[in-house]
Amino acid sequence: MVTRLVQDAPVLDPALIADLVIALRVDGSSLAHAIARVVELVGEQLVDAGIALPALAMACASLGSLDTTVRESAQFEIETLLPVPDGPRVRVVIPDVPLTRLRKPTTN
């Protein structure tokens, strides 16, 4: 299914995305779950399909691997595509010169 998504890009079929997500959720592995989440985000246009689809295709190919290192590497790569939540918008300002070093200007 992911191959068809790649071949049909940039047009993304919502039904194909939904079917792929369901199939991945049935797999139940942590890699499949990560792939499903990114596929959903691609469908919602929150993750760029041009960047994500090749990585998703490679990760789906890794699903069948018995090598845990391969699966963990694929999962790491897929999880780097997940959006990072914005933290609090706090601006900390540290003065270049401490107040104790400031002096009044002298008049001549």
Image (cartoon, helix red, strand yellow):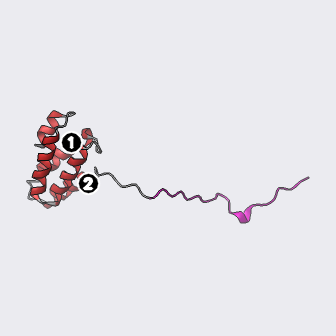
Q: Which residues are magenta?
A: 88-108
**Image quadrant in which the N terminus is located:** top left
Tell me which amino acid carries mark 1: Leu
Q: Position of residue 32 (x, y in %)?
A: 15, 55
The percent position of residue 50, horizontal first and vertical second, equals 25, 38
Residue lying furthest bottom: 100
Classify 10 Å Cα crowding around label 1: few (below 14), some (14-19), many (20 and above).
many
Q: Is residue 82 left or right of residue 7?
A: right
Q: Are marks 1 and 2 in contact (CB under 8 Å)?
A: no
Q: Most extreme residue toward the right, as rendered?
A: 108
Magenta span has 102?
A: yes
Residue under the image location 28 percent in, 49 percent down: 81
Tell me where residue 84 appears, x and y as whole percent.
35, 54
For marks 1 and 2 on the same chain, the one whose residue lies earlier in the sequence: 1
Q: Secondary structure at mark 2?
A: helix
Q: Is residue 31 above or below residue 6?
A: below
For label 1, the residue is: 53
* Magenta residue check for 55: no
Question: Which amino acid type is marked by label 2?
Answer: Glu
Q: Which mark is residue 106?
A: none
Q: Where does residue 33 sit, x and y in percent of width and height?
A: 17, 56
Residue under circle 2?
Answer: 79
Residue drawn at 40 percent across, 55 percent down? 86
Residue ID at (12%, 60%) = 28
In the shown orientation, is residue 13 left or right of residue 77?
left
Q: Label 1 vs label 2: CA separation?
A: 13 Å
Predominant SS of the magenta segment: loop
